[in-house]
Image: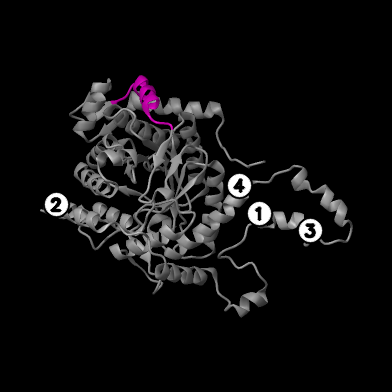
């Protein structure tokens, strides 16, 4: 079967960017605000200046870290039927994470999101067939900041049986998250076998790692929790203006985190992520652009070169509404990223460059993915699909509808589940509904009828005690 694929870099160009990144680490170095991480780097053989919180990392440490990193990672879930493996064979789709705002599906107004919004969106993500995992859809702005990552995680796990990808801003937050997940799966040793959550850490471009997230990632790596390292340099501000140099900085930042984690805990599950950006030089703000997609897709080739699992940001429209701009940006981004086949594609349900969660956008993104997956499946050419015997039988002017061959193959066609594909008259009789209204009705239906399996009552009590301890410590 012919399957289309997309790539931007030649093998020579991939190796050139890799070597450039290594030179950055060897010569320019990296600022690491965590003494614990600096100690790990020094013990491994890096040159460390504690006064400047600075390290230069030699090539051999990068090469050793790449050898230690696992090439496949199993992502597990509360319900084992949602388990999957990151093995570079097919993309998996993640609902977007952490936007402070939400489009209220009842009022249509943009407002700050709450824990209740996270719970509702988690139920929707749990229902949708192409959502394989979810980041926090929204941010619990009604929860005190020191508790937010922990409570958001628990809210998602309560309201979805799928894998959760979240955040931890300190080692203590990471430890409490490990406790909660361990309570759900039956202990820390079981969690190491079945990691039901993963955590994203972001670098501070250019070439900086903060204390909190870095130390959180070390705790998580030691516990066997997958760590997704997300550099986010912006071409022209936190990286040079050219695409190649921005990619070199992004790659150097990732390799730094990989070295820290693989020398902290050899064999730690680490995911290569990319979310490089472009700025509008008139205003200085980040924008959605073709160049951003190109860089992310090219960096996915670096992940393949390293034979590491990968995650890319996509489907994150800059539009503030569910309008034509959101539609074309999401469709183009999703199709091109699926053609590149990273392990995880992030961004479902996001608008305004990831600042808004929209339940209706999440529904529509699921439909776009369904279309895109059929597109990238390509076509098959053989005796059965050419059907010359059927053509000969029916002949000129005939009808193929009643043929057994048609009955055998008609279900292979893509069938819309949300988009209107019928005549104007049929659409008009159905109420002349635009797709955002159809999606809104689907949101209401899901929230009324879909009930994820609850966490057992005894586990809920145990987690309640963990949350009480976390509050007593983190809110004092």
Give the image location of residue 51, x and y in percent.
Answer: 17, 29
Mark 1 residue crowding within 10 angstroms, few (<14) / some (14–19) / many (20+): few
Q: Quadrant of the N terminus?
A: top right
On the image, numbered disc 2 is attached to which residue?
469
On the image, numbered disc 1 is attached to which residue?
412
Taking the image as drawn, is residue 375 in sight? Answer: yes
Taking the image as drawn, is residue 351 in sight? Answer: no
Give the image location of residue 365, x and y in percent.
Answer: 50, 58
Position of residue 411 in the picture relative to residue 65 (left or right): right
Labels 4 and 2: the sequence-earlier one: 4
Q: CA distance from mark 3 to mark 4?
A: 28 Å
Mark closer to the observer (2, 1): 1
On the image, numbered disc 3 is attached to which residue?
403
Which span is picked out in magenta?
56-71
Q: CA distance from mark 2 to mark 3?
A: 68 Å
Q: Is residue 279 above or below residue 431?
A: above
Mark closer to the observer (4, 1): 1
On the image, numbered disc 4 is attached to which residue?
376
Labels 4 and 1: the sequence-earlier one: 4
């Amino acid at each position: 079967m012919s399957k289309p694929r997309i790539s931007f870099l030649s093998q020579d160009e991939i190796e050139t960017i890799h070597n450039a990144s290594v030179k950055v680490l060897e010569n320019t170095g990296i600022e690491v605000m965590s003494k614990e991480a600096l100690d790990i780097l020094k013990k491994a053989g890096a040159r460390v200046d504690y006064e400047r919180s600075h390290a230069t990392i030699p090539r051999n440490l990068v090469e050793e870290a790449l050898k230690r990193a696992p090439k496949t990672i199993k992502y597990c879930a509360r319900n084992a039927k949602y388990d999957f493996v990151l093995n570079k064979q097919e993309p998996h789709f993640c609902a977007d994470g952490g936007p402070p705002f939400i489009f209220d599906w009842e009022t249509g107004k943009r407002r700050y999101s709450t824990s209740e919004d996270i719970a509702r969106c988690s139920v929707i993500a749990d229902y949708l067939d192409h959502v394989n995992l979810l980041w926090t859809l929204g941010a619990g702005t009604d929860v005190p900041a020191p508790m937010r990552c922990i409570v958001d995680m628990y809210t998602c796990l309560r309201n979805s049986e799928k894998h959760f990808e979240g955040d931890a801003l300190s080692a203590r937050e990471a430890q409490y998250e490990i406790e909660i997940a361990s309570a759900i799966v039956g202990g820390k040793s079981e969690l190491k076998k079945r990691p039901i959550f993963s955590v994203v850490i972001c670098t501070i471009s250019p070439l900086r790692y903060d204390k909190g997230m870095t130390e959180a990632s070390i705790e998580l790596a030691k516990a066997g929790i997958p760590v997704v390292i997300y550099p986010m340099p912006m071409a022209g501000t936190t990286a040079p203006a050219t695409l190649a140099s921005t990619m070199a900085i992004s790659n150097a930042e990732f390799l730094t985190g990989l070295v820290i984690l693989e020398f902290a805990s050899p064999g730690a599950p680490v995911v290569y992520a990319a979310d490089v950006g472009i700025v509008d030089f008139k205003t200085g703000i980040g924008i959605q652009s073709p160049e951003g997609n190109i860089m992310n897709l090219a960096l996915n080739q670096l992940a393949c070169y390293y034979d590491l699992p990968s995650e890319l940001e996509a489907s994150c429209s800059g539009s503030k509404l569910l309008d034509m701009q959101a539609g074309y940006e999401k469709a183009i981004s999703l199709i091109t990223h699926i053609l590149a086949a990273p392990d995880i594609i992030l961004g479902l349900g996001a608008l305004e460059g990831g600042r808004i969660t929209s339940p209706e956008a999440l529904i529509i993104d699921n439909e776009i993915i369904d279309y895109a997956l059929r597109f990238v499946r390509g076509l098959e050419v053989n005796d059965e699909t050419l059907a010359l015997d059927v053509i000969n039988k029916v002949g000129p002017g005939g009808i193929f509808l009643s043929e057994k061959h048609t009955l055998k193959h008609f279900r292979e066609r893509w069938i819309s589940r949300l988009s209107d594909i019928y005549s104007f008259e049929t659409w008009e009789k159905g109420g002349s509904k635009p797709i955002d209204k159809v999606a809104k009705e689907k949101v209401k239906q899901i929230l009324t009828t879909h009930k994820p399996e609850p966490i057992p009552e005894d586990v809920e009590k145990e987690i309640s005690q963990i949350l009480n301890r976390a509050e007593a410590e983190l809110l004092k």
